[in-house]
Every structure is written in structure tokens, then in C-alpha cells.
């Protein structure tokens, strides 16, 4: 049975890499080892090793779950921040029939700036496939299109929202939204977790793909609860000025938004059991 070493970090949960894995399964039964070098993200502040590993572990858990649901035999690990050293260590422990490396395009990829693919080809005597994932804007579009609230929006609308989005990063325990503050942006979690705290109690938890901030978006009033990063977290921040036209043009989207706000308000007012 062929064994494949899949090496990726920020592009790990992308559809392009998962398609590459599926293509090999169409040929014959295979096993996959997912290697996630804990390379710190390039955005914002300086990431600690612990924070970088936490984000890598979050992505690994998500992709292993998706692969399991698809019937793919896979295991994985978070490894050295240097992808070349991580691959070298993997080959000391077991042999693979092919290496699949997934990166962003060269201008956005620290791995490619370090000539990773060529070094791996020169060192390891197995086939190497380089999967180039979409650039950051396409990643934003993909993330937005998978948010249940936005499912079914026209592609042009998703593209418009992605262009108006910014990427924000938060350390563990950092307040993303402060209760009582004013702001009308919407947030979508890309990686990590967050918790909603109202009146001193945790009333909800968010994970990748979840959106929050709807109540103040709709009425322009103060935020109704704290939202706090529960571990290192990356979010997309959506401009309300760009989102409002989508609500006006799509009654189904407006209805979904109202339902989401209703559920959030109900959760906030539930008694402590």
C-alpha cells in the first residue's frame, strides 16, 4: 500500500490539497501521514513557539476529521518549524513513496523563499509533488463561502466581501469584542477558538467558520457580550458597509441573519443551570 507524506500548514485545510489526496485514492488504497511544521504565521505580532504549535494542531485536527469522514486512512503530527528538518526527521522513522508539499504562491510563501521544494527533491529519492494553494484573497473567499450564513451567495458578492475583509490575529485571552463597546464589523474565525462571555459566564463557543458580531451589526448599538480568544486565533473582519448591500439584495440572507441573531440572543438570556 503506497504511503504518502503530506507537508502543509496554513494551506492544510484548503480544497486544492484535499483534491490532490482524493486523486491518489482513486487509483488505489493508500495511507497518508500529515506533517504540519509549526511555522509561525507571518501576520501581525511575533508568535511564540507554543502559539504557532497550537494553530498548527488546530488545523491538523480539522483536516484529520475531514479525511476520516471521507474514508481516508491518515495520521498526523505537528513537527519542527523548519519544514525541511521536519521532513528529514519523518524519513528517519519511516519511508514514504511520495512527498506532497502544499504552499501559497512564491511571493506569499516563506517555505518557497527558502527553496524548500528543490532541496527536498535533491535530498529524498522519491517523487515530490508541489501543490500551490490559492493566494490570500482566494483563501478569504473560500472561507467566506463556507460560512453557513453566507452559503449560496453569488460569487461576485463573496469576492466583494473578501476584498473588504481584513485579517486579524489574537493571542490567547485577548478580547476580540468588548461588551459595551461600539462597532458594527462582523468576524469569521479562520483558525483557533473563541468564547462568548456575558455577565461573567461563558454562554457560547466559536470555532473555524463561525461568524459573530451580528447584533451590533444590525442595530448599531453596543456589543452585548465579550468575545475572547480561547487560544491563538485568526479572524476575518468584514466591513459592515460592504455587507449591508448583500442583505438588501438577498432576502434569504437577511432571514438567516435574523435567525442567527435570535439564536444568539436566546443563548445570552438563558439562565445558568
Image (tube, rainbow, N blue to C red):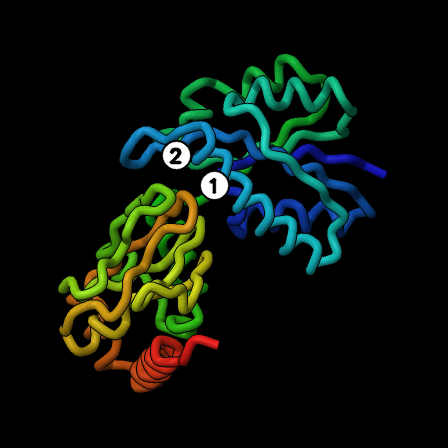
What is the quadrant of residue 172 in the picture? top left
State the residue at coordinates (16%, 69%).
222
State the residue at coordinates (42%, 74%).
152
What is the quadrant of residue 146 in the picture? bottom left
Q: Point out residue 246 in the picture as x, y percentages from the top left corner.
A: 25, 74
Q: Can residue 28 be seen in this view?
A: yes
Element marked by disc 1:
helix
Contact between labelled residues 2 and 1, with CB atoms less than 8 Å apart: yes
Q: Is residue 253 visible?
A: no
Quarter holding the N terminus is: top right
Residue 270 or 60: which is nearer the viewer? 270
Q: Point out residue 141 in the picture as x, y percentages from the top left corner.
A: 37, 57
| Residue with the most extreme front position | 273
Q: Point out residue 238 in the picture as x, y percentages from the top left corner.
A: 25, 60
| Residue with the most extreme right position | 1
On the rendered structure, is 190 left or right of 248? right
Q: Point out residue 48 in the picture as x, y percentages from the top left corner.
A: 40, 29
Vertical placement of residue 256 versus 107, above or below: below
* Residue neighbourhood size for the residue with mark 1, other residues' Cα within 10 Å, grouped as few (<14), some (14–19), many (≥20): many
State the residue at coordinates (21%, 81%).
248
Element marked by disc 2:
loop
Give the number of the mark in front: 1 or 2: 1
Residue 44 or 83: which is nearer the viewer? 44
Residue 98 or 176: which is nearer the viewer? 176
Name the residue that disc number 2 marks. 41
| Residue with the most extreme top position | 123
Name the residue that disc number 1 marks. 55
State the residue at coordinates (30%, 86%).
251
Mark number, residue 136: none
Cα–Cα gap, marks 1 and 2? 9 Å
What is the quadrant of residue 156 in the picture? bottom left
Amino acid at each position: 500500500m503506497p504511503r504518502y507524506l503530506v507537508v502543509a500548514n496554513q494551506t492544510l485545510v484548503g480544497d486544492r490539497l484535499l483534491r490532490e489526496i482524493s486523486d491518489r485514492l482513486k487509483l488505489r488504497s493508500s495511507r497518508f501521514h500529515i506533517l504540519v511544521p509549526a511555522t509561525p504565521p507571518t501576520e501581525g505580532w511575533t508568535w511564540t513557539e507554543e502559539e504557532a504549535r497550537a494553530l498548527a494542531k488546530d488545523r491538523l485536527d480539522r483536516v484529520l476529521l475531514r479525511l476520516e469522514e471521507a474514508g481516508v486512512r491518515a495520521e498526523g503530527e505537528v513537527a519542527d518549524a523548519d519544514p525541511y528538518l521536519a521532513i528529514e526527521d519523518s524519513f528517519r522513522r519511516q519511508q514514504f513513496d511520495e512527498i506532497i508539499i502544499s504552499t501559497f504562491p512564491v511571493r506569499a510563501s516563506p517555505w518557497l523563499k527558502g527553496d524548500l521544494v528543490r532541496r527536498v527533491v535533491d535530498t529524498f529519492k522519491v517523487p515530490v509533488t508541489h501543490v500551490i494553494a490559492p493566494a490570500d484573497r482566494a483563501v478569504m473567499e473560500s472561507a467566506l463561502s463556507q460560512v453557513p450564513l453566507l452559503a449560496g451567495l453569488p460569487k461576485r458578492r463573496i469576492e466583494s466581501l473578501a476584498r473588504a475583509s481584513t485579517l486579524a490575529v489574537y493571542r490567547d485571552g485577548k478580547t476580540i469584542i468588548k461588551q459595551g463597546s461600539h462597532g458594527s464589523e462582523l468576524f469569521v474565525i479562520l483558525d483557533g477558538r473563541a468564547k462568548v462571555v456575558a455577565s461573567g459566564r461563558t454562554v457560547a463557543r466559536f470555532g473555524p467558520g463561525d461568524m459573530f458580531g451580528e447584533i451590533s451589526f444590525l442595530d448599531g448599538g453596543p456589543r452585548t457580550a465579550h468575545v475572547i480568544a480561547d487560544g491563538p486565533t485568526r479572524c476575518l473582519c468584514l466591513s459592515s458597509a460592504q455587507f449591508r448591500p448583500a442583505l438588501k439584495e438577498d432576502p434569504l440572507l437577511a432571514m438567516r441573519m435574523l435567525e442567527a441573531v435570535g439564536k444568539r440572543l436566546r443563548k445570552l438570556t438563558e439562565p445558568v443551570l
